[in-house]
Amino acid sequence: MKVHNVEMVISAVRPEQYPDEGYPEFALAGRSNVGKSSFVNRLIARKSLARTSSKPGKTQTLNFYKIEEQLFFVDVPGYGYAKVSKTEREAWGQMIEQYLTGRETLQAVIQIIDVRHPPTADDCMMYDFLVHYEIPAIVIATKVDKIPKGKVDRHLNIVKEKLNMRREDPLIAFSAETGTGMEQAWSEIKKRM
């Protein structure tokens, strides 16, 4: 998909603040600093619409990005970041859970995982949450450019096994650097619109 129009619509913390256009929505979930912003920026061919940060825990709201007047990407706070107070983490958790379980326009969660390492306990917990609530997932194994080509399949299998992935959820090898997996990611998104 060629993207010409992208607009950051709102940073929301409560349902009454969510946009009401009714476009299909795709939430972006992943550990703090896993590369969610780089994923979005690569997909929409922008350098810095989604802010990348070297400081984990930067996203603290649900950020709604309207793409081509057709869909929303919703960037949710990264999980598994320890330097945030327990109270703050719990508040984020409730905000994210409320959005993921109650939003009718949510089509799928795009869960981003660093393919160089086996999924963490937090990655597994997030995926189990999606399975429990029957929320479709598109799993993006990012940073695939950082491992030798011959080892990619092995790394992908580790992700699949560790998450105990459902058959219907795609697993896409992705690189924000090279653009690997971009077409496939868009095709999975379009299928669900």
Image (cartoon, rainbow, N blue to C red):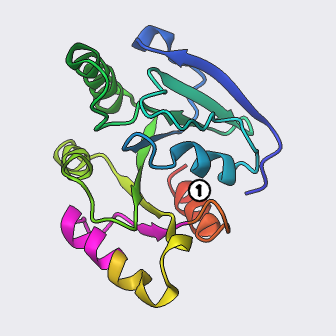
Residue placed most toward the observer, 8 or 121: 121
Residue at 42% over, 57% down: 138
Residue 133 located left or right of residue 174? left
Tell me the crowding category of disc 1: few under 14, some 14 to 19, or many 20 or more residues within 10 angstroms, Cα based. Answer: few
Residue located farthest toward the right when viewing the structure as drawn? 4
Q: Which residues are magenta?
A: 156-174
The answer to whether residue 164 shows anywhere in this view is no
In this rendering, the answer to whether 87 lies above or below 157 is: above
Residue placed most toward the observer, 127 or 189: 127
Q: Which residue is mark 1?
A: 190
Q: Position of residue 92 (x, y in %)?
A: 32, 21
The answer to whether residue 47 shows anywhere in this view is yes
Locate residue 69: give its quadrant.
top right
In this rendering, the answer to whether 90 lies above or below 168 is: above
In this rendering, the answer to whether 100 lies above or below 187 is: above
Total marks shown come to 1
Q: Is residue 128 magenta?
A: no
Question: In the image, what residue type sits under mark 1?
Answer: Lys
Q: Position of residue 41 (x, y in %)?
A: 67, 46
Locate residue 161: give its quadrant.
bottom left
Please, what secondary structure does the residue beneath circle 1 have? helix
Locate residue 163: give its quadrant.
bottom left
Residue at 27% over, 31% down: 82
Residue located farthest toward the bottom when viewing the structure as drawn? 150
Q: Which image quadrant: the N terminus?
A: bottom right
Residue located farthest toward the top when viewing the structure as drawn? 16
